[in-house]
Amino acid sequence: MVTKRQREIIIGAILGDAYLQKTGKHNARLKLEHPERQRDYLLWKYEQLKNLIQDSPKAVERYNPALKRTYIYYRCQTHSMPLLGRYKRYFYDERGRKRIPENIAQLLCSPLSLAVWFMDDGHYCQRDGSAHIYLPRYKNEELKLLVTALQQNFGLHPRVVWKKGYPCLYFPRDESERLMALIKPWVPSCMRYKIPF
């Protein structure tokens, strides 16, 4: 059984670093992976979703030929299930491109989802008190859906800016303070470095 809290974490993870892999006609599994420095964060996700996950997180080595370095990642994956198959159809098109679904306002409505998304893809800039959430190359209409959902559900008004060819949600100081107030209660101690104190 998938609890409400688990669904909220899953939605945040899908918007962030997680990947949904199709398994058959109607099902999918959620794949979670983080670098070694975020091992404790992956363990937190594992504990939250433990009854849905196949096995405990495992270390994986990857060699980067350009940098001539080996990196360690930790990863785990859930069992295949219809709920994740439905989310796969929402968040990915037929070609496997990640997208923002039309019903994002119904899906992204919990501060916990917002917190997981920020922990995955967000950055707080101490210098000017701004926050950023980095995004894939979503279409303009998808970006509008995302911004509208944040406005309706959380009273947040980020701007879409472009950095190195990718869109990014930019929260100036006032908006950043609202965002931090919303997500702070949900951020585990291992990820507190992502938010101001």
Image (spheres, rainbow, N blue to C red):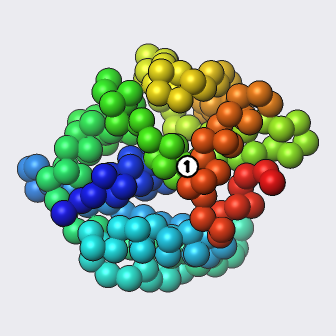
Classify the position of the C terminus by image quarter.
bottom right
Query: Is 196 placed left or right of 62 in the picture?
Result: right
The answer to whether one can see residue 104 in this image is yes
What residue appears at the point 9 percent right and 50 percent down from the top-left corner? 25
Quadrant of residue 78 in the image? bottom left
Residue closest to the eye, 178 or 72: 178
Exactly how many numbered labels are in the figure? 1
What residue appears at the point 49 percent right and 80 percent down from the top-left corner? 60
What residue appears at the point 73 percent right and 52 percent down from the top-left corner? 195
Q: Where residue 128 sits: x, y (%)?
A: 88, 36
List the single residue furthest toward the right. Answer: 127
Instruction: Kindly identify which residue carries mark 1.
Output: 115
Quadrant of residue 131 in the image? top right
The answer to whether one can see residue 64 in this image is no
Query: Of the residues shown, which amino acid type is indicated by label 1?
Result: Ala
Q: Where residue 125 sits: x, y (%)?
A: 81, 44
Query: Is 97 placed left or right of 179 in the picture?
Result: left
Secondary-structure class at tag 1? helix
Quadrant of residue 52 in the image? bottom left
